[in-house]
Image: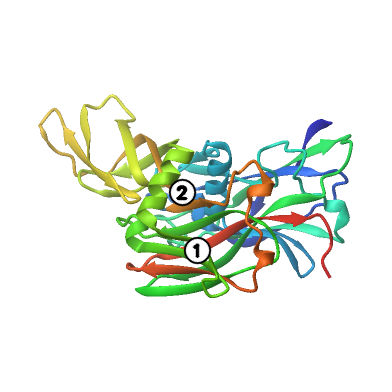
Amino acid sequence: MRVRDAVLDRQLAKADTATYERDLDIRDPISALWIEVYSTNGATSNKGNFISDIVTKVEIVDGSEVLASANAKELQALHFFKTGKMPGMFPSEWAGGNQREAIPLLFGRRLWDQQYAFDPTVFRNPQLKITLNKAAVTTAGATGFAAGDNIYITVVAKIMENMVGKPGKYLMPKQINAWTSTSGDRRIELPTDYLYRMMLLRAFVAESDINEVITDLKITADSDKFVMASRKVVDMDAEALALFGLGTLKHDFLCSHQDTIRLIFNKEPMLQPYYETDYPRGIGVDWAWSSAAKLFIYDLATPTADTTDRNYTIMESGHAPHAILPIPFGLLEDESTWFNPKDFGKIEAVLTEAVAATCSIMLEQVRPNMKVG
């Protein structure tokens, strides 16, 4: 086998609200699609908005058949849980600054996995689609992403050539459901078509931990004939930290004394902040938890609290990126240990909700490289 990178597009300009579309007319298996998106902040600021907010969906489709579908946050978290590393992410709130983030779509257990890769030749017309919306969180303009200043898309296909045999399957990420939590039990039906390797559960609202939003999770088959898990989410999160460890990234933000800033990591965030010029500032972390933090910022020459917004940088570490909890099914390297839903007629996730938040469930499944229907 040998590998190569095929640049499908580099910094292709798209409008404030748009869909990027590209035919995957490649004759060899694809190990991954490396997607990078960047855009410019407004002239005043862009507080609390990330590139991952405005990339609302990444899909591979073949006509009406969906071969992969997830949002940017789910794919970034999935990359972390597969590799132990955050993809290249450079969130920034600075006036007129650029933000760019990688959104990798890995079809294997890792990059260049020869057992699992996407083979576009077995489908009629596979296409990559990326849905973009600058106003997903904040209206485009001076205090959001700059209005009318393009979103730029780069897509690189990681291709494997001269293989002894093409992989007969790939790992398919697919969002199953997205909703706003309330309170009480919610039942979500899960598919029974392909093996489950991993589930991702997102439960995001600033200043609430995942386990405060959803307190309990049960995965049950055929009305409790088989209960795969019935757990407290706080315990599952502690296990996830032990299994997957901490991630780290650089984060540029704009704030003054006691402003609340939005973080990438939901659980146990650790911050190392510093000022971007020689001006004498005293910076300390007041608190940091639940996807948010607040800083002490003092003018050391006075000394008084600095109530003027200024540019700062933090090195941010933590786990549960984008408030996402991983739920692995068996040994992540060994397909024989993954969960086979075909043994059952109906599978449900039962979630006990306690706080209103943005929630979703995504499954990574083993899908054959073959046209269905």
Instruction: Please state if 24 lies on the left or on the right of 81 as rendered.
Output: right
Query: In the picture shown, does residue 144 fall above or below 190?
Result: above
Percent x, y for residue 247?
Answer: 45, 37
Task: Count residues near mark 2 (Cα–Cα under 10 Å), then give few for <14, some for 14-19, many for 20+.
Answer: many
Identified by mark 2, the residue type is: Asn
Front in this rendered view, residue 135 or 197 = 197
Front in this rendered view, residue 147 or 104 = 104
Percent x, y for residue 295?
Answer: 23, 41
Instruction: Please state if 113 lies on the left or on the right of 279 as rendered.
Output: right
Sequence-first tag of 1 and 2: 2
Residue occupying image coordinates x 88% and y 46%: 27
Under circle 2, the secondary element is loop
Instruction: Please state if 165 lies on the left or on the right of 279 as rendered.
Output: right
**Direction top: furthest residue:** 278
Q: Nearer the viewer, mark 1 or mark 2?
A: 1
Quick one: quadrant of the C terminus? bottom right
Query: In the picture shown, does residue 187 fall above or below 252?
Result: below
| Disc number for residue 360 | 1
Quick one: quadrant of the N terminus? top right
**Direction front: furthest residue:** 225
Residue occupying image coordinates x 32% and y 49%: 292
Front in this rendered view, residue 72 or 277 = 72
Report the residue marked by disc 2.
41
Task: Count residues near mark 1 (Cα–Cα under 10 Å), then give few for <14, some for 14-19, many for 20+.
Answer: many
**Mark 1 touching mark 2, by CB under 8 A?**
no
Percent x, y for residue 3?
Answer: 79, 32
Asked which quadrant contains residue 353, the reply is: bottom left
Asked which quadrant contains residue 314, the reply is: top left
